[in-house]
Image (spheres, helix red, strand yellow):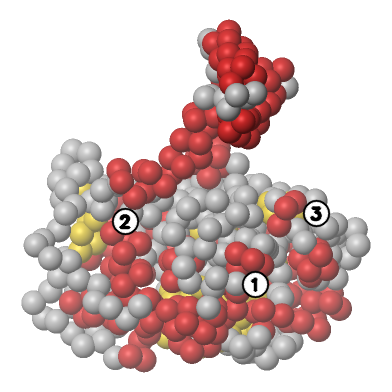
Amino acid sequence: MLRITFYVLSLLSLAAIGLLGPSHPGAYYFLIPIVPLIGVGLHDIFIAHQNVLSNYPVIGHLRYIMEFISPEIRQYFLESDKSGRPYTRQQRGLIKARAYGGEAVHPFGSEYDVDESGYNLALHSLAVKTVPEAEARVTIGGPQCSKPYHSSRLNISAMSFGALSSHAVLAMNKGAKLGGFAQDTGEGGLTPYHLKHGADVIWEIGSGYFGCRTQDGRFDDEQFRKKACQDPIKMIEIKLSQGAKPSHGGVLPGPKVNAEIAAIRGVPEGKDCVSPAAHPEFDSPRGLLNFVKRLRELSDGRPVGFKLCLGRRSEFLSICKAMVETGILPDFITVDGAEGGTGAAPVEYSDRLGLVIDEALPYVHNALVGCGLRDKIRLIASGKIVDGFDMAQKIAIGADLCNVARPMMFAVGCIQAQRCHTNTCPTGVATQDMRRARAIKIDARAVNVQRYHAATIRSFLDITGSLGAATPSELGPEYFMQRLPNQEPYSYAEMYPALEEKSLLGDNVPERFARDWALASADRF
């Protein structure tokens, strides 16, 4: 404890200056640093709430300074190419290289521990195929959709204006226009920045109904109709839950809720903008599907689907039962992995709740197969997808296409500073401080977004052909393996055995689905 030392040094310093001052006037200049330091020390002892500062006045601040810069110290000096989290230095470097049009190559062999549990690999073929460019797109729109969307296999995942700056949204929007792919608005709602450059847009509707809500927070049909029928809007996505914070409403911290965002979302300025954990418009699987039908009609037949992070399996099977019983089908389902997330979230939610994408995707795929619905519904994978290998692997285990969020943030300048929730993002990507946001050169960063997308799609098609598949639809879980803790590699087909078509609808439900299927009900989650 240095309180006594602080008092003694303070008195000695002032006394020394008092004694030297009359004969050496320059000594008074030492008061310029000493008086503020004494003031800081007195504040630390009598006012500050931190125990460290109370016991170690002035010098205790060094502890908090080091804590503040510790993420940068780890990132720049301590991380290896493979150890960074949530994205490794190698992953960030690959995205940056592709965004800038460089070569994403690595010399001298893999640095991964190929014997480590969790290591993924694919089984290549000697009969390499050339996959046509046309396979980079897929049509979304089931039998109940009158305006299907011919989508890229890779699109920008849900990121709201508010979480992202206007310059970041604009750069991504222009990049999507240049590359011919879609941008998801995130639950923050449709904004002028999503329409500025005419890119294809997926409008996400969260439980807060931002941009189409009444004053009391309910869904407003007329507001929605006017906006959803604009030409750039290609699909509508209902957000049930998301990987970063499943079963928890979205959070936009108060410092980010400026006048513009408040007006766009219809919420109070300067206060935390928190979406309800559940939708006010429905509370059952039947209600969800009726809402899907309602939005499809209001949007003149555009594809409508929903996004969820898979939790209780019986609840997803409840939705499947409701599809079978009502005949109402979504056009797509976005499966968000629990490892995803670009915005602020409670630590326990982002670390502990929900299934990761590689467990959730096969389950959702098999459930739809077991109900005889898979050929009518597209599956979108969203969860820490970086490169062509990731895309091929996700499509092999059940997806039709993929969404990426954080890689697009890297493409527009994000450095993984992890200050997204503080409004002090050093690169201007995740902030509403225009002084910071203007660092993003929209035209240049749009080209980065387009280049990253094009290079990743090209890598995906190349890997698909290297596995011996002529089209992505030929990829299956048997093409990919994961090393388990017993050191043996198992294929995803072995880890997640396929269900037979309509096998959930008969009397002999497969054992691994039987308990959850029995618990499932179309009338409740």
Q: Nearer the viewer, residue 504 or 473?
A: 473
Q: Are marks 1 and 2 in contact (CB under 8 Å)?
A: no
Left or right: where 376 falls relative to 458: right
Looking at the image, which residue is at 68% across and 20% down? 42
Q: Which residue is mark 2?
A: 89
Q: Which structural element holds mark 2?
A: helix
**Residue holding disc 1:** 166
Q: Is residue 120 left or right of residue 182?
A: left
The local crowd at label 1, few if under 14, some if 14 to 19, many if 20 or more residues have their Cα within 10 Å, is many
Q: Residue at the location (52% across, 63% down)?
A: 427
What SS does tag 1 mark? helix
C-alpha gap between disc 1 and disc 2: 27 Å
Disc 3 element: loop
Could you tell me which residue is drawn at 71 percent across and 80 percent down? Answer: 192
Q: Which residue is farthest top? A: 4
Q: Tell me: residue 48, above or below residue 209.
A: above
- Which kind of residue does numbered mark 1 sit on? Ser
What's the mark number on residue 270? 3
